[in-house]
Image (cartoon, rainbow, N blue to C red):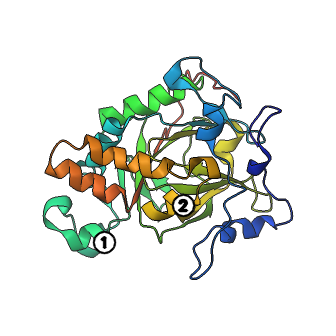
C-alpha cells in the first residue's frame, strides 16, 4: 500500500502467496486470465491525492511506496510528445555505434537498424550507452563514450524531484520488451557506487513491476508502470531484488487495469499516435503499442561530494 491511511484495499498484496511465487503469479499463461487486483496503481493514487507527495510542483508529484524506503514513482512525468521523441532516439539513434547491443556477437556492428534491417530490429533486446560492463572481468570498461545529454538532464531532473542532488548519468541500459518478454528478479549490484539512485523510464506498453527486499524470500510489491512514468530507486530500494514478470499489449492494457482505469492505457498509447507529426513518428508510435521500452540510467562511480537523497 502507499503511505497514507486511506490507501484503497484493492492495492494491498495478499500475504498467502509465497514470495518466490509472486513472479509466476503475473506471467502470461495460455488460456488463463490473470488477477491484477493486488497491483498498486500509482497514477490512480496520485490523482486522488493519496500517498506521499514529495514535491509540490504539479509535474513533480512523486509517490513514495510504503515498505520500500527510497522508492519513488513519478506518474506521467513525460508528455506524449516527450515520450515519442525519446522513443525515436531509442529506436533510431541509441542502437548506433559506438553504443552496443545484444546483436553485436551475432551480426557485428550494425547501423541503421530502424530503416533497413527489420529482421535484426525484431531481435533487438537491449543497448548500452556510456560505461560498458565487461561480464568476464566483472568490471566496467574504461574510457566510455558520453551519455547523451538529454538522458543526463532527464536523470538529473527526476532525481532532484525526489530530493537527490548531483546525480551524474554515466551508464544507460535500454531494454526492448515484447509482450512475451519477462525480466527475472535480480539485483543491480555491479556499480562501485551503490548509493546513488537508479532512474527508470517507461515507454510504450504497460508492465507489472515487482520489488522485494534484500533476499528473494521477502514478499515483493506489485506496481503498474505505464508509458511516461518514471521510477527512482534510491536508499534501501536501490539494493533490493526487482523484476518484470509481465508486459501487456494494447488490448490487454485496455482490459486488465483497475476498474476505474480500464481505458487509461488505450488513451495513453492512442495519444502517442495523435501527436505523431510525420510517417516516421507514426511508425514509432505504432511500435510502442506492441512493445515496451525501458531506460535505466545510473551513476557508476562515487562522486567526492554526493548529496544525500531522501531515505
Say above or below: 115 vs 170.
below
Task: Indicate the secondary structure of the residue bearing disc 2.
Answer: helix
Name the residue at 82% across, 67% down: 17
Indicate the quadrant containing the C terminus: top left, top right, bottom left or bottom right. top right
Name the residue at 66% across, 60% down: 36
Work out whether residue 28 or residue 114 is closer to the camera in this orientation and state it: 28
Work out whether residue 165 or residue 143 is closer to the camera in this orientation and state it: 165
Quadrant hosting residue 33: bottom right
Category of crowding for the residue at label 2, using alpha-carbon neighbours closer than 10 angstroms: few (below 14), some (14–19), many (at least 20): some
Name the residue at 13% across, 65% down: 116
Residue sticking out furthest to the bottom: 31
Q: Earlier in the sequence, mark 2 or mark 1?
A: 1
Find residue 16 and report its horizontal and vertical position in percent.
86, 65
Task: Judge left or right: residue 182 versus residue 25.
Answer: left
Task: Indicate the secondary structure of the residue bearing disc 1.
Answer: helix
Task: Judge left or right: residue 94 versus residue 19.
Answer: left
The residue beneath circle 2 is 255
The residue beneath circle 1 is 105
Amino acid at each position: 500500500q502507499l503511505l497514507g491511511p486511506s490507501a484503497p484495499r484493492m492495492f494491498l498484496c495478499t500475504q498467502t502467496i509465497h514470495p518466490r511465487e509472486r513472479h509466476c503469479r503475473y506471467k502470461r499463461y495460455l488460456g488463463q486470465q490473470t488477477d491484477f487486483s493486488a497491483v498498486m496503481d500509482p497514477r490512480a493514487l496520485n490523482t486522488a491525492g493519496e500517498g506521499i507527495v514529495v514535491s509540490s510542483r504539479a509535474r513533480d508529484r512523486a509517490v513514495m511506496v510504503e515498505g520500500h524506503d527510497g522508492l519513488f514513482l513519478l506518474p506521467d512525468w513525460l508528455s506524449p510528445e516527450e515520450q515519442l521523441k525519446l522513443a525515436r532516439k531509442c529506436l533510431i539513434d541509441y542502437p548506433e555505434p559506438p553504443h552496443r547491443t545484444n546483436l553485436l556477437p551475432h551480426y557485428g556492428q550494425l547501423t541503421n537498424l530502424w530503416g533497413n534491417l527489420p529482421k535484426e530490429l525484431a531481435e533487438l533486446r537491449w543497448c548500452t550507452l556510456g560505461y560498458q560492463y565487461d561480464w568476464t572481468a566483472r568490471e566496467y570498461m574504461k574510457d566510455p563514450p558520453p551519455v547523451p545529454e538529454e538522458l543526463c538532464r532527464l536523470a538529473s531532473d527526476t532525481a532532484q524531484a525526489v530530493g537527490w542532488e548531483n546525480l551524474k548519468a554515466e551508464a544507460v541500459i535500454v531494454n526492448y520488451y515484447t509482450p512475451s518478454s519477462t525480466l527475472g528478479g535480480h539485483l543491480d549490484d555491479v556499480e562501485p557506487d551503490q548509493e546513488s539512485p537508479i532512474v527508470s523510464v517507461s515507454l510504450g506498453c504497460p508492465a507489472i513491476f515487482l520489488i522485494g527486499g534484500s533476499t528473494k524470500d521477502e514478499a515483493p510489491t506489485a506496481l503498474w508502470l505505464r508509458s511516461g512514468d518514471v521510477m527512482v530507486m534510491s536508499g534501501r530500494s536501490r539494493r533490493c531484488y526487482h523484476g518484470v514478470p509481465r508486459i501487456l499489449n494494447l488490448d490487454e492494457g485496455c482490459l486488465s487495469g483497475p476498474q476505474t482505469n480500464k481505458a487509461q492505457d488505450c488513451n495513453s498509447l492512442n495519444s502517442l499516435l495523435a501527436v505523431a507529426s510525420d510517417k516516421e513518428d507514426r511508425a514509432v508510435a505504432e511500435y510502442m503499442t506492441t512493445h515496451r521500452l525501458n531506460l535505466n540510467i545510473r551513476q557508476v562511480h562515487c562522486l567526492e561530494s554526493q548529496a544525500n537523497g531522501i531515505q
